[in-house]
Image: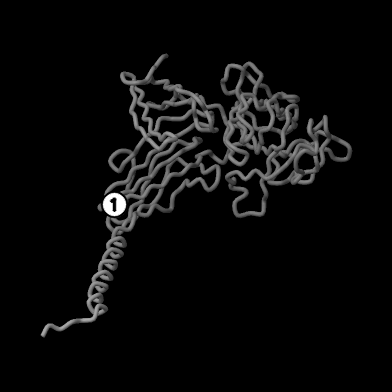
Amino acid sequence: MKKHYPLTQQIKPLATVASLAVALFVSSHSALAQPVIANTYPNGSAQFQGTNELTFSATSPAGIASVSVTLTPTTLFGLQGFPQTLTSTSGLTVSGTANGQTVTAPLTTNDLYSVKIVVTDVNSVSTTNNLSFDTIAPIYYTWEAVDWDYTSGGVSGQFIDNPQVNQYAGKASTDGADFHSTNPGSGNSNYRPQGLETEGPADVPRPQYVGTTNIDYDVGFNSGGNWGDYTRHYPAGRYNVLVRASDGNGPQSNAGDVSVVSGTSSFSNPGPYYFSVKSTGWSTYAWYPLIDSSNVPAVLTIPNDGTASTLRMTIDGGNCNENFFMLVPVNTNAPAAGQGYITNSFPDGTYQFQQTNKFNCSVISPNGVQSVVVEVAGNNLSGGSYNKTLTASSGLTITG
C-alpha cells in the first residue's frame, strides 16, 4: 500500500533547497566585493592642498586588474585643460601587490582639478571615485574681504599688516572713509559692527579654519556702489589679482572692480580692472581673476619702496559675495609641450534653461591644435537618450 505524506512534509525539502540557494547567492556576492579606493590626497576637503602629485591606495581581495585616472585641469583664470587619462602603463606610478597598491599621478601646481579614478579587479568589478580639488600653493598672499580699513580714536584708514585670522573682529569703520554702503543694515554684522555686511560663507574651508575655533566670513548683501578699502604693505612684485566669490542671482559680466586709491602700487595694462562671476549659487564659491578692458588678466606692480598701498574693491553689477583676495606672481614661464585649454563654453551648466541649438567653445594651444573631438551624450525629457562623437569631418564647425 502506497504511503501518503502530509503536505507540510513534502514542502520541507523544498524550503531546505531554497535556503541553500539564498546562502549560495549571498556567499557569491561577498566574494565579489568591490575594490576600495582610500587615502586620497589631495581630496578637496580643504583649499590650498598644494602638491604636484595625486596619491591614493587601491585594494581588492580578488586582485587588481587595472587602475586609471582621468585628470581635467582648469587654471585659476578659467581655462580648462584637455582631459588626460593615465594608466599603470602610461603615466601612473604603481607599487605594491596584486591585492594592495599605492598609486601616484603627476599634477600641475596652482591648478583646479576634476578627477575620475577607476579601479577594476580581475572579476571586472569596478569602483569609481570622482573628486575635485586645487593644488594652490599656500604661500600666496591673501587678505579677507571682511578686513577693510577701520577707525579708532576718531582716526579712519587704520589697518593691520598681515593680520592673523579674525584680527579685525569687532573693529568699527567710517562710511565714506573706510568703506561705503548704499544699502546699510540690509544684511548681517556677524564679524564687525555694521558697515559692509558680514556673514558665514559656507565655502570649502581653508587650512587655518580646519580643526580650529576660527570662523570664516564673507562680505554679502552687496549692492552696486558699495566699496571697501584695504590698506597693507603688500609684498613687492608683479601679480595677478584673484577674488574668491559666489553668486546666486544670475551671472555678472562686471560684478566689481579693484583700483589703487593711494600708495605707489599700479596696474600696468589698460583699465578698468574688473572681475566677472558666474551664477553658481550663494554657497558655491569659485576663483575669478581681475581682468583689464582687453579681457586679459590685470597685472598689479608693487614696488619695493616700503610704502603702504590702498586697494579699493567696488561693487558694480552687485549681488556677489566676496570671501577673500589673492595675489599670484605673474607666470612668465613658457607653456608646457602639449598644453592646451578649452574656454568660453556655452551652454556650460552654470544655470538652468540655457536654451540653444548649438554648443560653442574655444580651443587654445600655444603649440597648435592638431584635432578636436566632441563626445555628446544626453537624455531628452521624454526619456530617450542619444550618444554622438563629432569631429572636424563629421559634425563640427571649426574656425580660426
| Element type at mark 1 | strand
Q: Which is more toward the observer, 162 or 187?
A: 187
Q: Residue furthest left?
A: 1
Q: Residues within 10 Å of mark 1 (few under 14, many from 20)?
A: many
**Tell me, what colour scheme is on the image?**
one colour
Residue 301 at least partly seen: no
Q: Residue furthest top?
A: 400
Residue 381 at least partly seen: yes
- Quadrant of the rendered structure where residue 149 is? top right
Residue drawn where x is 27% and y is 62% of the image: 28
Q: Residue furthest bottom?
A: 1
- Vertical position of residue 260 compared to residue 72: above or below: above
Q: Which is more toward the observer, 55 or 252?
A: 252
Which of the image's four quarters has the N terminus? bottom left
The kind of residue tagged 1 is: Asp
- Quadrant of the rendered structure where residue 174 is? top right
Residue drawn where x is 66% and y is 19% of the image: 272
Q: Which is more toward the observer, 351 or 238?
A: 351
Image side of residue 152 versus residue 72, left or right: right
Position of residue 168 measured from the top left corner of the image (x, y, whole percent):
75, 43
Image side of residue 139 versus residue 51, left or right: right
Position of residue 329 measured from the top left corner of the image (x, y, whole percent):
57, 30
Q: Residue furthest right?
A: 154
Image side of residue 305 versus residue 68, left or right: right
Residue drawn where x is 36% and y is 30% of the image: 375
Position of residue 307 measured from the top left corner of the image (x, y, whole percent):
73, 28
- Vertical position of residue 81 compared to residue 43: above or below: above
Which of the image's four quarters has the C terminus? top left
Residue that carries the numbered disc 1 in the rendered image: 121
Position of residue 62 measured from the top left corner of the image (x, y, whole percent):
27, 57
Residue drawn where x is 82% and y is 38% of the image: 173
